[in-house]
Amino acid sequence: MRNRDAGYAQLPPRTRRRVAAASLLRSLLVSVVIVAGYFLLPLRLDGAAAVITLVGGLVFVAVLLAWQIREIARSPYPRLRAVGALATSVPLFLTVFATTYFLMGRAQPANFSEPLSRLDAAYFTVTVFATVGFGDIVAVSQSARAVATVQMIGDLVVVGLVARTLFGAIQHSLSHRE
């Protein structure tokens, strides 16, 4: 077996495929667990749960991203590690907001233009993330609009700053090998 410090490009094609498939499979599995957890785990319905979910979830996502950036810089395959980091961080980020919207909608149905199921909350989260805004589900209350605004700002951070940071970590790792 080749040295783990060998660059991905220097690996034999079969090994490259195996390493890439393992990385993608691991990321897919983590993403499936995150989404399944969102739809299957019981959620508390008191008013404070939404705030705790949002703040705690965003802190967790930030800590996870910091750890992933460090791991990318140390990884023998930084590109694969960065793709895996994005493939797990983005679903987790979206799930935090979907959970928050779901809890807000359950605690106070007037927060949104219609009652939100878990699927509705996930749908609303993705339409905000994708900046589509179909208008079929609307944040009506000030608190729901505030959370949607926080998500929009977070979306910009995820798309811009985090992507830049992840790819910067790849470049840093690759430049230290040359």
Image: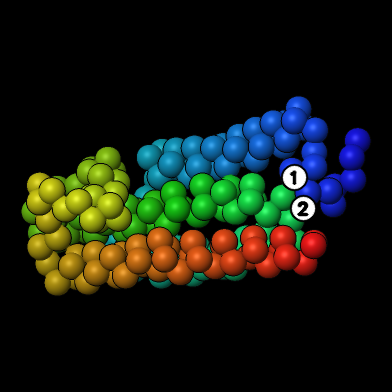
**Quadrant in which the N terminus is drawn:** top right
- Image-based side of 169 in relation to 133, left or right: right
Three-letter amino acid code at the position of disc 2: Pro
Tags 1 and 2 in contact by the CB under 8 Å rule? yes
Identified at 65% across, 63% down, the residue is 171
- Image-based side of 123 in relation to 94, left or right: left
Extreme residue toward the front, this view: 178
For the residue pair 138 and 27, the one nearer the viewer reads as: 27
**Quadrant in which the C terminus is drawn:** bottom right
The span from disc 1 to disc 2 (Cα, nearest Å) is 7 Å
Q: Quadrant of residue 30?
A: top right
* Disc assigned to residue 8: 1
Identified at 77% across, 67% down, the residue is 176
Residue, disc 2? 76
For the residue pair 174 and 85, the one nearer the viewer reads as: 174
Q: Is residue 64 visible?
A: no
For the residue pair 31 and 80, the one nearer the viewer reads as: 80
Q: Is residue 107 visible?
A: yes
* Disc assigned to residue 94: none
Q: Position of residue 135 (x, y in %)?
A: 10, 51
